[in-house]
Image: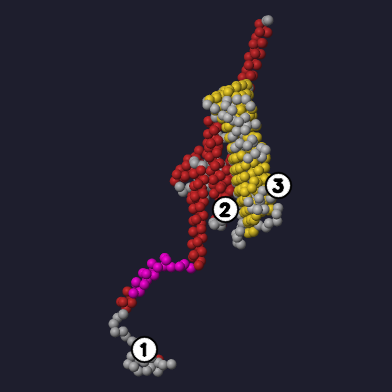
Amino acid sequence: MGMARRVSVALWLLGASAAVYATGDRTFERQVPAQPRGVVDISNVAGSIEVSGWDRQEVSVRGELGAGIERVDVTSEGGRTTIKVVLPQISGRHGEADLHVQIPKDSELDVSAVSADIRVSGVLGVQRLNAVSGDVTSELAGSDVDAKTVSGAVRLKGHGQGARLHVSSVSGDVHLEHGGGDFEASTVSGTLVVSLDSARSIRARSTSGDQRFEAKLARGAMVDATSVSGELNVRASAEGGYAYEVSTFSGDIRDCFDAKPERTDKYAPGRILQGTRGEGAGHVRLKTMSGDVQLCDRN
Amino acid sequence: MTQPPDAEGRKVSSLRELPQAIEPARDLWPHIEARLSQIRAGATAANARAPLPASQRAARRGWLAAAAMVACVAVGVWIGRSLLPGAVYGSADGAASTTGASALDAVYVSDPRYARQRAALLRSLPAHLAALPPPARAKVTASLAALRKAKYDLESELGKDPGNALLQELLVNTYQDEMRVLTDVRDASDAGRGI
């Protein structure tokens, strides 16, 4: 091989390694033993976090690490497995990491992200999912779920199993399909779109965000939804019926059972609609300042 | 009808027969003046306890209702603050400014401890917002603006109808929500540094 050819090969290798370094993408894989009902903590700033439950008693982590990621720490001790994407101490940018994590299906899951999206499936234990601007998506499996975002959307999907579901977001939209049990949600400007197959209680609050509920209420269930300027649209049927009280300061009240709202005061604004459907076993209370309210007892 | 006899037992048949003036045996004025002074002093003291006219009673009830409303809202805010320690009121644009605070705001933040926490968090709010990813920052700023508008609207209506329980409840909710948002923003920016 001539000198010129050797030099060109060396330059090519140098260029190739420089390109790899520039993109910074590399993969990461690690497996650690875990208890079947242990706790798994995962934190990642940016990118994505995908978690799924499996039957093995180990936690498997696979990741694609972008530029700016220093390393991924995975530790398992005393029933707690911790997975942490570590950025350099002096980092002017947030590196992205895409994590794929498999955990024992009965684990308790604790996930924290900034702009990383969180997706969870097949996990039967309690889930606490927190993101700032990342979206949170999870399958419900009958255990409690606590999802919290600042601006990210929350999407939960269940099969009607009873659980305590607590969702809070500043501006993110909240979607719940086929939930059950006790649902509590609050948002400022996000929209709530919720369907519950068997609800014991619904408590929801928004400032300007609209709320839409379709629910089958258990006997004696309680619904309490308030908004300042958002619209409330509740379609709720209930075993045993419910007593309802709908009040608004300046919004409109509509219903599908021909009840007529009354003025709360002869001289001041304000309307109220109250009465009973069926036996009146449950309670539905809806309140707004200027948002319109619609109540129907048929799904 | 019989006529009363005069002092000497004579009957009076006409008003003209009566004397134009009868001088008392002694000067009665000092005694009368003393009594009048006593009565005047007693009346001044009794005025505070005397029943008010209907219009004044209605006005007093209105003020009492307004005071009760403010007290209820303040208690609600205090409860919310207790549940969410360290939360504060902040401006929608993220600026640490208290100039826009209304008179009602001043009532809500009258607790010195709360006022201190509020001031500290208002100072750090721009930094907390700056630590958020840009899309989140824009959305949170919009949400803070929505909260501020909600508070303004509710307070304006409550100014016209201070006893409205629905508006009071929604205002307390809004204050609590605002505290929650500011706490979440602070926690979110701390999380960004901590991860």
Q: Main secondary structure of the magenta part?
A: helix
Which of the two residues, B157 or B5, is positioned nearer the viewer here?
B5
> What is the crowding at mark 1: few (fewer than 14 residues within 10 Å), some, or many (at least 20)?
few
Q: Quadrant of the N terminus of chain A?
A: top right
CB contact under 8 Å: marks 2 and 1: no
Q: How far, Cα to Cα, is label 3 from label 2?
A: 30 Å
Identify the secondary structure beneath mark 2: helix
Q: Do tags 2 and 1 sit on the same chain?
A: yes
Q: What amino acid does circle 2 point to?
A: Leu
Foreground label between 3 and 2 = 3
Q: Chain of mark 2?
A: B
- Front residue of B22/B48: it is B48
Callout 1: chain: B
Q: Which residue is labeled 2 in the image?
A: B167
Q: Is residue B4 left or right of residue A140?
A: left
Residue projecting furthest to the left: B26
Q: Is residue A30 magenta?
A: no
Image mark for residue B20: 1
Q: Nearer the viewer, residue A296 or B108?
A: A296
Going by the numbered disc 1, the residue's amino acid type is Gln
Q: Which mark is residue A299?
A: 3
Is the C-beta separation of discs 3 and 2 under 8 Å? no
Please give the range of residues in magenta: B35-53
Residue at image x 64%, y 19%?
A19
